[in-house]
Image (spheres, rainbow, N blue to C red):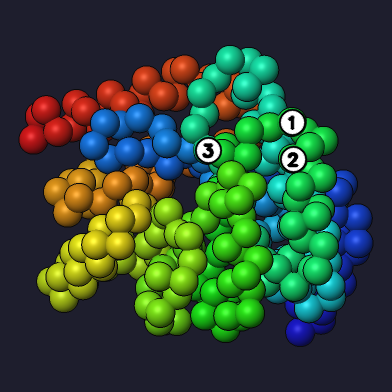
Amino acid sequence: MHSEILNTYEILQYLRNFEKYLFFEYQPLVCLETGEIAGFETLARMRGDDGRIIEPLEFVPLAVEHGFITDIGYFTLRAACGYVTAATAAGLDIGYVTVNISAAQLYDAHFIEKLSALLDETGIDPRKLVFEFTEDVVIRYAESYEMINRLPELGIGVAIDDFGTGYSGLSYFDKLPIQLVKIERSFSQGLSAKKTEALTRAVLRLIESFHMQSCAEGIETEEQLKFFREAKCSLGQGFLFGAAMSEAHLLSNFDALRATIREKVVQWFKVH
């Protein structure tokens, strides 16, 4: 208990100075048909004074509880815009960059105003941004729909994250301008069970029927890749394609990364 309290105290100290302790990595989203990189997800990480990496599951709940999450959200968004700016300056076509948006940001009355100001300041093409909202946010906070529906007016895409986590209520599908649905990783991990296979195929058909793209999270094996490609899933994300990487690493190695991923997908299906 003492260790847990001490750890919580340390994380809160880091959160009070989150600009010093947070860093960001980016994980590719890959087209399962061609092997091309469609975009990257922005992932926030925290590194303590002792060098230990503190996972989001440790610091995000505390950030929400103690009121840091809104400022962290804007800090993350600014970092993503910086990545887009750097990639554009380097002549790299990285596709779009996704950023998770919290419920607290949607309750910020100045959210659209702050977002517009950031787009003006950075000068990035807003079509390079896709905002991810978890299912619990869009289901529990239906009053946020008006704010979400304004995003396409700015050119920003909308995605649902962790679809199938137990909150599923499909009424929001035709009320929001969703272009991408990211399927929770438990579907990938449970494919050995026939019922999970059948359910996953049904989910993919449902997403397709609404003319949305699908993305399977947590693809780690060639068997999972084969299943989702044959089931007509649009995109994949997971360690099979690559772990999350720093901006500097991606900018220096983007062409090699793109070629490696494309070859891995294309060659695997040539062989099989």
Displayed quadrant of residue 127? top right
Query: Going 76% across and 47% down the picture, which residue do you hit?
Result: 116
Q: At 62% from the left edge and 70% from the top edge, which residue is drawn?
A: 146
User: Looking at the image, which is closer to me, 225 or 3?
Assistant: 225
Residue 96's label in the rendered image is 3
Can you tell which mark lies on residue 238? none
In the picture of the structure, the residue carrying the numbered disc 2 is: 119
Looking at the picture, how far across and down is residue 68, in whole percent? 83, 66
* Mark 3 or mark 2, whichever is nearer to me: 2
Task: Tell which tag, 3 or 1, sits nearer the viewer.
Answer: 1
Q: Amino acid at mark 3?
A: Tyr
Q: Examine the rendered structure and indicate whether residue 167 appears above or below residue 86.
A: below
User: Counting other residues with Cα less than 10 Å from the Cα at mark 2, is it few (<14), some (14-19), or many (20 or more)?
Assistant: some
Marks 2 and 1, how far apart in space? 6 Å
- Element at label 2: helix
Q: Position of residue 88 (x, y in %)?
A: 63, 22
Q: Could you give the CA–CA distance between mark 3 and mark 2, rounded to whole angstroms?
A: 15 Å
Q: Quadrant of the C terminus?
A: top left
**Visible residue check, residue 17:** yes
Say which residue label 1 marks.
123
Q: Are marks 2 and 1 in contact (CB under 8 Å)?
A: yes
